[in-house]
Image: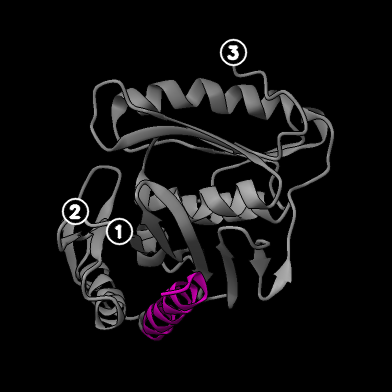
Amino acid sequence: MTLDAYLQTALDAAQAAGGFLRANFGKPLHVDENLAHDIKLELDKRTQALIESIILDRHPDHAIYGEEGLRGDQSAEHQWIIDPIDGTVNFFYNIPHFAVSIALRKAGQILIGVIYDPMRDELWSVQHGSPALLNGQPIAVSPRPTLSEATISVGVSKNIDTINRGMPLFEKMVRNAKKCRMMGSASLDIAYVACGRLDAYIENMISLWDVAAGILLVETAGGRVDMQPHASLPEKYSIVASSGKFDLGLE
């Protein structure tokens, strides 16, 4: 199977899921869990099931590693990394800023990345060895040379420890960057870095499914990604995705 075929699978799955989400946006929603700083919707599960059905119909021996659960042998050579609704809280509150994120990893290397914003019909895509694209056109990270001219997104995560660590960072960026943003969708934040809308995205606790597709996008578009495993929480990471054009002053 070629990378082109895998990319087409990811594109088809992302657009099908995006159409499903667009059709349900603004409608009554069933809440599975209402947490202090997050919401889990029944629609998340249905959207991942739709994505899984498209992928596994074409690639039945592949594994699924998704926010809404795992399928298949997780030691399989090919593993699809899925966030069916990245920005669930935005979706629930009728804020049209969320995305579908799909990546394919083979033997630990990300080969395919697709992020789809169904409300703006913006589709980021990349395959290993080819240019990063937005709606079919090549993209590149921002050329802005200084932090004082930069727009930075800082994510503040969902528990007290990461909130306490994230807020001083947010304050530092507010004071030193041109503008600081907190928009509620990690995959769109990192896609915006890849196409030069943002100069950096920083978060101190994130899951792989939030950013897997975006990592390949940013690196292919000329940027830099530093992702480190969390010291005490398995499957959690800190991430700095940036244009790489200047020092963010994070040390």
- Confirm or deny contact between disc 1 and disc 2 (CB under 8 A): yes
Helix, strand or loop for disc 2: loop
Helix, strand or loop for disc 3: loop
Numbered label attached to residue 67: none
Camera-side residue: 96 or 7?
Answer: 7
Q: Is residue 50 magenta?
A: no
Amino acid type shown at disc 3: Glu
x, y (%) of residue 75? 19, 51
For residue 139, side relative to residue 115 (left or right): right
Q: Earlier in the sequence, mark 1 or mark 2?
A: 2
Q: Which residue is mark 3?
A: 251
Question: Residue drawn at (54%, 51%), measured in percent from left and top?
Answer: 216
Camera-side residue: 129 or 195?
Answer: 129
Instruction: Check the picture and name the quadrant holding the N terminus.
Output: bottom left
Camera-side residue: 97 or 62?
Answer: 62
Amino acid type shown at disc 1: Gln
Q: Main secondary structure of the magenta part?
A: helix
Helix, strand or loop for disc 1: strand
Q: Earlier in the sequence, mark 2 or mark 3?
A: 2
Amino acid type shown at disc 2: Gln
Magenta region: which residues?
1-23
Q: Which residue is mark 1?
A: 79
Of tags 2 and 3, the one toward the viewer is 2
The CA distance from mark 2 to mark 3 is 36 Å
Q: Which residue is mark 2?
A: 74
